[in-house]
Amino acid sequence: MAEEKKAKKVFTLEEIKFNEANKTMAILACFPIIGLILLLVEKNDNFVRYMGAQFALVGVLQFFSWVPLIGWLLAPITFVLIIVGMVKAAKGERFDVPVISGLALKIMGAF
């Protein structure tokens, strides 16, 4: 029997639209651990999934903040990214984290 392979969905930034009904979830997705959970659990709202994917990756960067020298740069940057993401989500605007946003779209397609 031939096995069926699932094709990965390819997301684009045009598909990521804000949904007022899920505003609170979009704000919470800016916290890295909650963002990871929402990426895995949320199936209908691409905005929440996108924000969750981005900030799960920010959480990976935040993990390295304990390393001397590198951490001194990463810790404040990740903190600012989280705050900016929360403010933008509260306003209903999409926040694309530089460098990470493209990878976040690929992660969304994988899950």
Image (cartoon, helix red, strand yellow):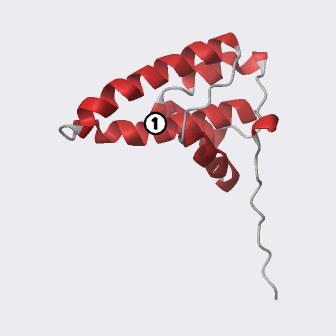
Query: Residue 105's spot in the image, x, y percent?
Result: 66, 46
Describe residue 56's horizontal placement relative to residue 19 as left or right: left
Quadrant of residue 89 in the image? top right
- For disc 1, the marked residue is 58
Question: Seen from this angle, which residue lies furthest bottom?
Answer: 1
In the rendered image, the vertical position of residue 47 relative to residue 8, given as above or below: above
Report the label total.
1
Q: Name the residue: 81% across, 36% down.
A: 14
Q: Quadrant of residue 43?
A: top right
Left or right placement of residue 30 versus residue 72 in this view: right
Return the x and y of residue 58 as percentages of the image width and height. Answer: 46, 36
Question: Is residue 37 something one can see in this rendering?
Answer: no
The image position of residue 61, as x and y in percent, is 39, 40
Type of amino acid at the residue the image marks with label 1: Val
Residues 83 and 37: in front is 83
Tell me the element at label 1: helix
